[in-house]
Each structure stands twice: as structure tokens, then as C-alpha cells.
Image (cartoon, rainbow, N blue to C red):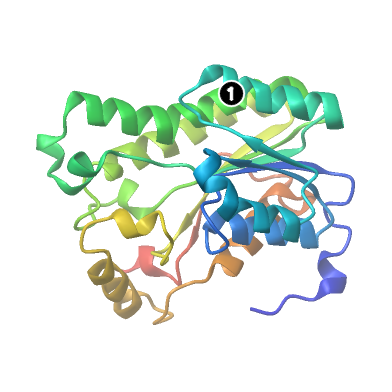
Amino acid sequence: MSTSPELLAGLLKGKVGLVTGIANGSSIAAGCARMFRSAGADLVLTYLNEKSRSYVAPVAEEVGAELLLPMDVTDDAALAAVFDSIRKTHGKLDFLLHSIAFCPKDDLHGRVVDCSREGFSTAMDVSVHSFIRMAKLAEPLMVDGGCLLTVSYYGGEQVVDHYNIMGPVKAALEASVRYLAAEMGPKGIRVNAVSPGPLKTRAASGIDHFDELVEAARKRAPARRLVSIEEVGAIALGLVSGFSSGVTGNIAFVDGGYHVVD
């Protein structure tokens, strides 16, 4: 994908953004971070634990992130510490990207009807409620308004083979986007989601029969191809920028048209 540097330069100049959920340089969140930085944003990045830090650190260096912070969304104190660090360092937050999802393997690979209570609770907590908690922590830092952005998938709207329990989880995430948009709109805070087609990322590889899902998407999409993390990043950039000042509560598909074909 080719985007004019002149068009992007300064689009997010002076803006502070938080990017979460980078697993490595090939992650959706990494593609978004690169686009945000190319538009002039100052970024804060997070990593899950010390093991994952070595994969995230090169991306943080690449985008010139001033802060690279540990964040486990199941630890409320760790989550709050990230936003406190942003407050102390930057005094504000203009946008954030939530690109976090998890489900225990046994529950992810099984039928929805067989999903355990513990597995469902974990998937909802990490994949959905973490976004709600981030919204609450970001609200007082978005003094001039802002944008909250998360990552969904078509399986939250229609049944996709092998997506299993993550379908209902993504449906809950998309509903949360709409309700948060309604609640936070009066403060000038917009809430949206990007919904990419299947991408060969580390996180997606945990889905059973993922190669089959990818090939089916390639054949079914009107564009007859998969999208790239750069293309997802470009839409994310547009959504957090002033170009989308009138857009909130929206699910933006970036899937080569996959979602329009029955």
C-alpha cells in the first residue's frame, strides 16, 4: 500500500495515542502504530509480560514511543498504572487502540454450547470488559475529546466456521462500542471499531483451521485477496483523526468486501 507522506504528515501532530495489543511487528496493532506515527502522533505502547516485551520493544523503537509499559488487563492496578503514567508524562490522551482478545484454547476450539463458564468469563473479561475499563480510565484524560478504537471481526455479526465462542464475544464488543459511543458522545469522545478480514497474525493462528478460514476469505472477498495490516492501519488512522470527527458508534470493515457476500 502506498500513501503520500505529504498527506499524512502532521495529521496527528500534537496528539497522544495509546496502542495496546501488539504481539510482534506483524500484529494489527503494530500496523496501526506505524500509521499513527507517520501522521505525527506521540505514542505510548504496552506489552503483556517480560516474555512479550522483547517482541514489542522493536516496534516501540521503530515508532519512537516515549513510553513502553507493562499492562495485563486482568490486573486492575497495572491497567490504572498505564493511564497514570500517561497523565504524568503527557497530561492528556487523544486516542487509544484496543487490540486485545483472548480465550482459553479448549474453549476456543470447542462448540459454543460446550464453552465452560470459566472460559466464557475469561474471554469476555479480556476481550470486551478490558475495553470498557480503558474507556473509563481514558475519559478524564480526553479533556478535548478523543477517540476510542477497538478491533472486531465479521464473526461477531454472522456465523463463521471455527470462530466459535469468539463470535458471541465480538458481538458483545460491538454492542459495547455502540453504548459507549452514546454515553461518551456528549464529551466529544468518539468510539468506533475496525473489523479486518482474516490476517495471518500470531493471535489469529490460535483459531482452529485458520488456514482454511483464510483461503475461504481470499476466494469469497470481491477483491479476491486478503487485506494487509497497513490497510487496517490506514483506516484506523482515519478514524482517530479529525477526518472522522462525525463518525462514532461505527464498525468499519476492512476486508476486501468479504462481509457483503452471502
Q: Residue at x 19, y 39 (%)?
A: 107
Q: Position of residue 98 (x, y in %)?
A: 56, 41
Q: In the drawing, does residue 51 fall left or right of residue 63?
A: left
In this rendering, would 4 be left or right of 154? right
Q: Nearer the viewer, residue 119 or 178?
A: 119
**Residue at x-position 31% and y-position 52%:** 155
Q: Quadrant of the N terminus?
A: bottom right
Camera sees residue 242 = yes
Going 88% across and 51% down the picture, which residue do you hit? 13
* Quarter where residue 207 is shown: bottom left
Give the position of the C terminus as an image quadrant: bottom left
Measured from the top left, where is residue 214 in percent x and y? Answer: 31, 70
Q: Which residue is mark 1?
A: 78
Q: Position of residue 235 (x, y in %)?
A: 62, 60
Residue type for callout 1: Ala
Is residue 179 shown to the viewer in this render?
no
User: What's the residue at 14%, 45% (across, down)?
Assistant: 110
The mark tally for this picture is 1
Tell me residue 59's x, y (percent). 66, 57
Q: Nearer the viewer, residue 170 or 111?
A: 111
Left or right: residue 107 compared with residue 57? left
Q: Compare residues 87 and 174 and report the one nearer the observer.
A: 87
